[in-house]
Image: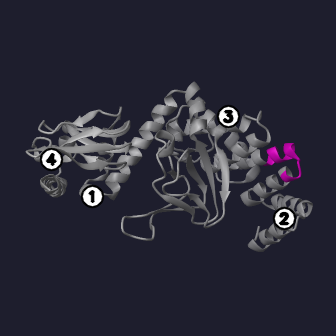
Amino acid sequence: MTEAERQAITAQIVAGKVQDAVAALRVALGGDPGDVWARQRLAEMLARQGRVVEAVVEYERLADALTATGEALKAMAILNVILKLDPKHTRTQRKLAELYARKRSAPTTTEPRTEVARVAVKTLAVPAAVARLPSIPLFSDLGRAAFLALAARTRLHQFAAGHTILTEGAPGSSMFVVVRGAVTVLRRFVDEPEPHVVARLGEGAVFGEMALLTGAPRVATVTAAEECELLELTREQMAEVTLHHPGVARVLEKFCRQRVVANLIAGSPVFKPLGTEARDALVSAFKTRDEPAGTVLLHQGRAGHGIFILMDGHCLVHHQSAGGRQQVAELKQGDIFGEISVVFDIPITATVTTKTACKLLYLDRGACERLVLTQPRVRELIRALGATRHKHLMELASA
């Protein structure tokens, strides 16, 4: 279908000439059964007319085609639409889960491996590449039953270019997966009036996931860089799934832990000298810890035992000197501490206590020495950072 033909059909839809648009779309699909745009518009128009059975048939064909070409996220979004039209219709969902499971265990091949794929390729004339189903963050680590349960609860949203999806500082209660299009991530920095663009996320990217784990305020503003489609999963929906599939909580926690550490490493000049394998090993080495308010994490004067990253909550830093004990800092989400004593092999310089219940990432001393401090350039950079922070702490304490 040419761009002019698409524009003509879009004009019919906007003008409310749905029946004319349906007729034109059927003609287009007769000439090119693999036209995904036409197939999706036809399904949407049939659903708008209340012709649910016909709409579901077209959506199924579309989902089969998308699955067969490896576009699992888009197929998942279409599955979501089918279930909204017909909640008892689970066949397409099962197909997607089965194909997804095959992707995790089957060798790479360019041939269709299932009847679903063969039918899709035959009827819609699209390339067969079931083995190219992508590894969707979070979802790809789930078992089949848990994947089905999550897929059934996600909601599909469409946003126009420029629409604000998340606002920095606002309460968070859901995560999103980009199905189509792209979003822009912006953050505000101290003493700068305007937010800065820090990332552009495309198809398959996940954002907002920390809200499911911690309920912390949004750390960035996210806007639609172009017209886009997103899948949303709320904390309540995740809780429902976790009741029947406890393993989902562990997968989410692992995913969030790896994302926090990976983002920290990627954005830190200290870890730039690390190669890909070393970075991956470091990400996997961090462990999650949940501590109640009032827990002493580091004791001034004792030997350092590891490095902490604060994922959620607040911690207080106190320094004991000849003049008495005084608070010198309050730590918040994203702050790192404990590295000075580990890097310089000196006693801990201040006591750190949880002010609230906290979720933390922890890298023990052995892993730090094995994975980080064996790298000469990284050790040099961390020593420089540690020296600066140690000097700053001493200045605060003396003041």
Q: What secondary structure is marked by label 3? A: helix
Q: Position of residue 388 (x, y in %)?
A: 16, 58
User: Earlier along the polypeptide chain: callout 2 or callout 1?
Assistant: 2
Residue at left offset 85%, top offset 52%:
46
Q: Secondary structure at mark 2?
A: helix
Q: Are marks 1 and 3 in contact (CB under 8 Å)?
A: no
How many neighbours does mark 4 have within 10 angstroms: few (below 14), some (14-19), or many (20 or more)? many
| On screen, residue 195 above or below 106 | below
Q: Residue furthest front?
A: 323
- Determine which quarter of the picture holds residue 188: bottom left
Query: How far apart are labels 2 and 4 at the CA level?
Result: 65 Å
Counting residues from the start of the chain, the first of labels 4 and 1 encountered is 1
Residue 129 visible in the displayed image: no
Q: Are marks 2 and 3 in contact (CB under 8 Å)?
A: no
The residue range painted magenta reads: 48-58
Q: Nearest to the eye among marks 2 and 4: give it.
A: 4
Q: Position of residue 377 (x, y in %)?
A: 17, 57
Q: Which residue is mark 1?
A: 272
Instruction: Residue at 33% x, 46% y: name it.
Output: 280
Task: Identify residue for label 3.
Answer: 94
The residue that mark 4 highlights is: 343
Q: For mark 1, does the 10 Å Cα neighbourhood hold few (<14), some (14 to 19), or many (20 or more) residues?
A: some
Give the SS element for disc 4: helix
Residue at numbered disc 2: 13
Residue shown at 34% from the left, 34% from the top: 293
Label 3 packing within 10 angstroms: few (<14), some (14-19), many (20+): some
Q: Earlier in the sequence, mark 2 or mark 3?
A: 2
How many dots with numbers? 4
